[in-house]
Amino acid sequence: MDFRIEDITPEEIDRRLAVVEPLTDSVRDLVDAVIRSQVSDDELQAAKATIDEVVASLRTRQRPGGFGTPYTREFIGMPWGNAAVGARNAIAPPLRVTRSAGLAECDMVLGAAYEGPGGCVHGGVAALMLDQLVGEAASTDGLPSFTGTLTVKYLRPTRLGALNARAEVTGREGRKTFVHATLSDDDGVTVEADAIMISPKGFELPTGDALPPPANSRADRDV
Ligand SMILES: CCCCCCCC(=O)SCCNC(=O)CCNC(=O)[C@H](O)C(C)(C)COP(=O)(O)OP(=O)(O)OC[C@H]1O[C@@H](n2cnc3c(N)ncnc32)[C@H](O)[C@@H]1OP(=O)(O)O
């Protein structure tokens, strides 16, 4: 797993987020617009040419590989490429997770970009959301952990739209943390998951303290 220190202040984090979050929002909006657009073929082709120009301009300077999760010297993580929460990742809804001891929760709106069966959330997307939540719940004591096993049970179709996800630690055994998670709509639970999360062998925080919550968005930073 890549680990790098980015020696910046909380103010600099906020400044960078203020630039990238609106950009990512625009790209997210673009994805939705392309899926649902009913303009003519000529207009679609013109849009492609404009988008290709923007992509070429962004590619003039690129990071090799993924974004990774840089940490400040105070161990504030910046998982900005993360597929569920990343501030620079338009694939992420993005989730805005609230955490307390052994608990992680978030509201989200999953639109057209997350469709599997017509009008419903893709099963893999539901699993992605719950995987993030179980990871967040298991990590609230400060130790990061990997998903070892994630068992997902789809109780009924999840309609696209407003949803809530919740994960709660149910037990710990050595390096293993057990977590139960649910995805719900207004009528109740649609998907539930159980996870066995494993902390890496010999991993200790350099400070011996719990990690502060990651800085995924300006909203998180305001908490
Ligand atoms: C805040 C951040 C949120 C991030 C959320 C995102 C979460 C993710 O998606 S993480 C990415 C997906 N997961 C992965 O890529 C993990 C890949 N797997 C691995 O790296 C390793 O197999 C790992 C770390 C899980 C376990 O390896 P290792 O530490 O060597 O395990 P090992 O020493 O053999 O076993 C330790 C214990 O865990 C158990 N265990 C090991 N692997 C698993 C597993 N896959 N499932 C369940 N239990 C397991 C063992 O049985 C053992 O239990 P016991 O102590 O009772 O005997």
Image (spheres, rainbow, N blue to C red):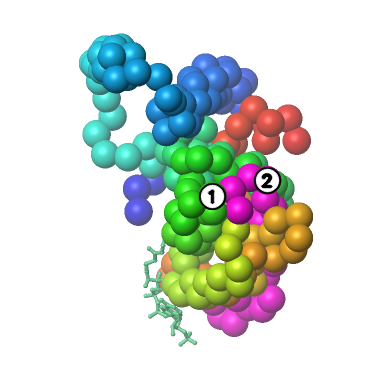
Going 35% across and 53% down the picture, which residue do you hit?
1
Relative to the observer, which residue lies in front, 152 or 58?
152
Lateral position of residue 45 relative to residue 27, left or right? left
Q: Which residue is mark 1?
A: 119
The image shows residue 180, relative to residue 166, as above or below, that is below
Indicate which disc residue 38 carries: none
Mark 2: secondary structure: strand
Could you tell me residue 3's position as x and y percent? 39, 46
Q: Which residue is mark 2?
A: 162
| Residue 202 makes an appearance in the image | no
Q: Quadrant of the C terminus?
A: top right
Lateral position of residue 133 relative to residue 43, left or right? right
Lateral position of residue 39 relative to residue 96, left or right? left
> Which quarter of the frame holds ligand 1?
bottom left
Of all residues, the one furthest to the bottom in this rendering is 173
Mark 2 or mark 1, which has the lower sequence index? 1
Relative to the observer, which residue lies in front, 169 or 9?
169
Going 66% across and 78% down the picture, which residue do you hit?
171
Q: CA distance from mark 2 to mark 1?
A: 13 Å
Magenta span of residues: 159-178
The image shows residue 129, relative to residue 213, as above or below, that is below
Relative to the observer, which residue lies in front, 121 or 180?
121
Front label number (2 vs 1):
1
What is the magenta segment's predominant secondary structure?
A: strand
Could you tell me residue 57's position as x and y percent? 28, 13
Task: Report the number of numbered marks.
Answer: 2
Residue 209 falls inside the magenta stretch:
no
Mark 2: amino acid: Ala
